[in-house]
Image (spheres, rainbow, N blue to C red):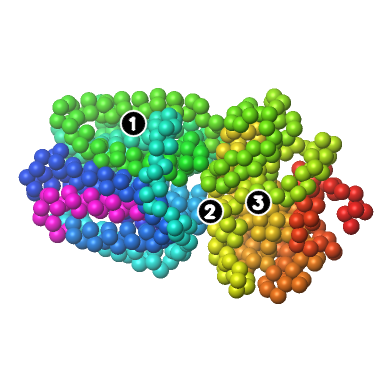
Amino acid sequence: MKTELIHQKSYALMTSLYVTIPLLPLFAENYGVSLAEAAATGSVFSLGFALGCLVYGALSDKYGRKQVILSGLFVLIVLSFLLGTVDSFGWLIVLRGLQGAAAASFSLVALAYAVEMFPLEKRVTAIGFISTGFLVAGIVGQVVGGWLSQLYDWRFLFDVLAVAYVITFLLIWLFLPKGERLYPDASVWEPFRQIRHVFRAKNLLLGYVIAFVLLLSFVSMYTVLGAYLSGPAYGLDAQQIVWVRAAGIGGMVLSPLAGRLSKRFGVRGVLRFSLLLAVAGLALLGVGASLPVLIGMTLVYVSGIALAVPSLILLIGQLAGKLRGLAVSVYTFILFAGTSVGPILSIHWMKTASYAVTFAAQEKLHRRIWILCMATCADCPYNFGETPSKPRKRGPSMRKRFITEKVAGFELSIHLPSSYTEENKRYPVVYLQDAGKVAMDGYNYLDHLFNSKQLPELILVGIKPHDRNHDYTPWPEGALVADRPSFGGGASRYVQAVADEIKPHIDANYLTMPEPEHTAIAGCSLGGLVSAYAYFNRPETFGKSAWISASFWYEGFISYMQERALPAEKHRVYMYVGELEGVYKKTIQSGMVAQTKAAHRLLLEKGFPPEHLKFETDPLGTHDSFFFAFRFMNALKWLFGDGTDAFPRERAN
């Protein structure tokens, strides 16, 4: 239901951008303005949309995703009804600009919402649907606008849109989960303070040039196409032009496939191929071919754009690293800034040159951005879904074994193996909660296991949380006792930061083995709980997990495990609980042992391979760091070594 709602809203909102393309001659006639001036009705919408993209991400962090979406929809409803009543061209321009600013409340917020609220198995589908909705609306908007303007007064079109927004508002209000306010104390102006860092990256700047041209050419091509088809070369009437525009929808079906194709062929390859498709389609549009060939070329061109837009999002995110969120906001701003220029530029070309020259100019732009694409991707760390062919030795001095860094707002404590300076050697990585304290509590013995070859050398990355009760809990819950803090439920955001920002940074700057089978996430207590949560949400990132005295007593977590399907990816898990943990507690924590055993039993009942799951208990074990460090060594040997105990059996008991 959530996917359908967001998909529907992406259609409804983005249709508003494109509905005025077939109405430009009507605006020029009704208001006594030139065609170029009439094109401002689309350009000012795009400009308002682009500016809104810079602030709505921060607003949704502060006030909540659903709240911002609904607020934007309400304003959009009011503005759409007002647009159906205006008699002044000046007010038409003003209201269209405000309409664009209100519509922008959806694009970035919906993408962030999809990442945070959808389970892994539905996340890629949801984002693909959102991207497809944006693109298909580019054609549907023109078809609807052209069709309704033939049957009714053009003002009726905005009344229809307003009703569609009312229905969408009610559906989202009733059925879309509220979500959490991630940063209620954050400043909405923070993106503007950080934006200078984005523009210092040369590759991002080149990527933004590509983004600017993509939708510029898309809107420009369809602005020219209507006049071209109604001219002497084809002589089509308005209804026939509507059907030619509608044919382009077939090319949009490729957009949801961009993620899968990028994993198989690399984001660079998909982006280059998509731009070449667009170049080929534009090159043949203005050569006077038969109508079926022209329709075929529009289909080729639209297919290229449909693949290029989501592929470029992947590339921008990859290039931006820890600035990914801000970089994608700027990307969206620039993408729609291009749409504001497209109509004006295309009308200028038509006035000063032939249709063939106009299409040729657009084709030349695409050829140049294909060259920019080659430059932009030249020094990417590696393709999306690929691993580097050679280890890299970048970043801090190789002489240091202990390094501290700050990535995505989190302090990292990185421990490198003693053999780290050796050439052509890469290492598995373990991401540890609570700044890696469990490893440091037994560091000398851990070093002994490495040096004695009982355990392969590992890179250990300790991550210091901002607030354990917030970062490590999957949903908000009240305090266990009156004088203790409550639980914030920020695990989704935390796991996303580790998987999508911290891990890419470590892989890009250290000699890692980035594949999931060589990547573990581990923690103790609430740190073990969030590590288990990461297994269910990001198994494609973390192929191994250690849940040491994990807080399975947390309200609703066993039910959550019961409702979720086991991820299909192969995984390896170590679990431990001491038999004395929680026995003296008078809160829900008293069920620590029983709930941990229930979690273990549930995994087996749901089909987790028993040979990939190790569960240990200690009859004398209490909830203390002494036992955590002891069992952490066993966990590493189970996950990465020969599976034997790290200590002699008689001492383990």
Residue 570 is situated, as x and y percent measured from the top left of the image, at 68, 48
Relative side of 31 to 133, left or right: left
Q: Residue at x 65, y 52 (%)?
A: 434
Q: Which residue is mark 2?
A: 493
Closest to the observer: 77 or 275?
77
Closest to the observer: 177 or 632?
632
Which range of residues does the magenta coloring cover?
A: 84-109
Residue 87 covered by magenta stretch: yes
Q: Which residue is mark 3?
A: 433
Report which quarter residue 614 is drawn in: bottom right
**Foreground tag (1 vs 2):** 2
Residue 382 visible in this rendered orientation of the protein: yes
Residue 472 covered by magenta stretch: no
**Foreground tag (1 vs 3):** 3
Secondary element type, mark 3: loop
Q: Which residue is mark 1?
A: 281
Q: Residue at x 47, y 41 (%)?
A: 323
Instruction: Give, as a three-letter code, the residue at label 2.
Output: Arg
Secondary element type, mark 1: helix
